Image: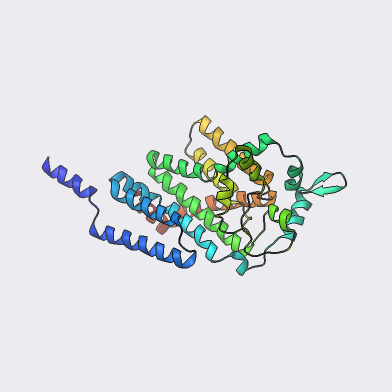
Amino acid sequence: MSTTTAAAGEKKRVSRKEMLVLAALSVGYLLLSYLLVGFKTDQLVLIGLANVLYFATPVTRKFITGFSIFIVFWVLYDYMKAFPNYWFNAVHIEDLYHAEKAVFGIQSGDAVLTPNEWWQLHSHTFLDVLSGIFYLSWVPVPLAFAGFLFFWNRQQFVYFSLTFLLVNLLGFVVYYLYPAAPPWYVQLHGFEFIPKTPGNTAGLVRFDDFFGITVFHSLYAKGSNVFAAMPSLHSAYPLIVLYYALRNKLGLLAKGIFTLITFGIWFAAVYTSHHYVLDVLAGIVCATCGILLFNWLVRRNGTVSKAIGQFVTAIR
């Protein structure tokens, strides 16, 4: 009895080495963040939350260890501010606008409009509110779904999380190879390239105005890069969730909800002038490629498969 209790105590105890590693990571992250993007309270919140969860209980320790995959995504996304993609390649503004009009243009009188321009002329309060709700879900839904998988199936949680990270990495690569301005940029600035342009709520301002809040204004003030419209990772995320919901044979209600959210975000991206239809299609392709690539790596690369298996074991 006492031996069992002692063994359980050993499992709960955090070793000195783990403490030192976590402290080094925390301090290193804060220092590097300060040098690259400046100090922000978000960084302290992240470090504080990670440390509290790691030291609280064995379950929360495994939880934050698993969610470190999402922390890596967040840190990389944040650090993109230090290296704007327009430093490396020319921003596509006019050519993308005309390509959208050529492929998806809508005849309106004597003019041909992009779908974004058409919806600007035909906006409706109901669609404003609905689009805002869908757009607010683009990060919480994947995180909530990951949390569900963590407690339901740790292996599928790791698969989902790594797929999410891989899709983002593919998207980030395209951001730097093909910097692209969103539709609202053309609406406000035309085809002139203006570096350091701040983020903009675009059509989502109608959601803020309707409720008398500044939720989207606050979110887009923290954007990493205005010229990262293609691919639309907003459109990629719900597709990853939907794929894993189908893969894990969740109930009909869950599948229906995730399908609705997926199509809702795709529509909202165009309706609010945050993305062209071409951006949304690129996001769908990015998610599809990430899913296929991850599945291929797990099946064909023994080293990757073994490393993932070890990580799954560590958080069980």
**57 horizontally vs 279: left or right:** left
Q: Nearer the viewer, residue 218 or 123?
A: 218
Front position in the image: 83 or 169: 83
Quadrant for the C terminus in the image: top left
Q: Quadrant of residue 223?
A: bottom right
Tell me which residue sits at (69%, 62%) in the image.
92
Q: Farthest residue toward the right?
A: 110
47 w.r.t. 119: above or below: below
- Residue shown at 25% from the left, 53% from the top: 14
How has the structure been colored for display? rainbow
The number of numbered discs placed on residues in the rendered structure image is 0
**Quadrant in the rendering for residue 205:** top right
Camera-nearest residue between 42 and 101:
42
Considering only vertical position in the picture, is 239 above or below 294?
Answer: above
Q: Quadrant of the N terminus?
A: top left
User: Would you say 312 lies left or right of 96 here?
Assistant: left
**Residue 315 visible somewhere in the drawing:** no
Q: What is the x, y in percent for residue 52?
A: 33, 50
Q: Nearer the viewer, residue 9 or 207?
A: 207
Question: Residue 301 at what x, y percent from top left?
Answer: 44, 57
Which percent across, then down, holds residue 310?
A: 34, 53
**Residue at the limit of the structure toward the front, as seen here:** 212
Give how far across and how far down residue 220 sits, in percent: 58, 52
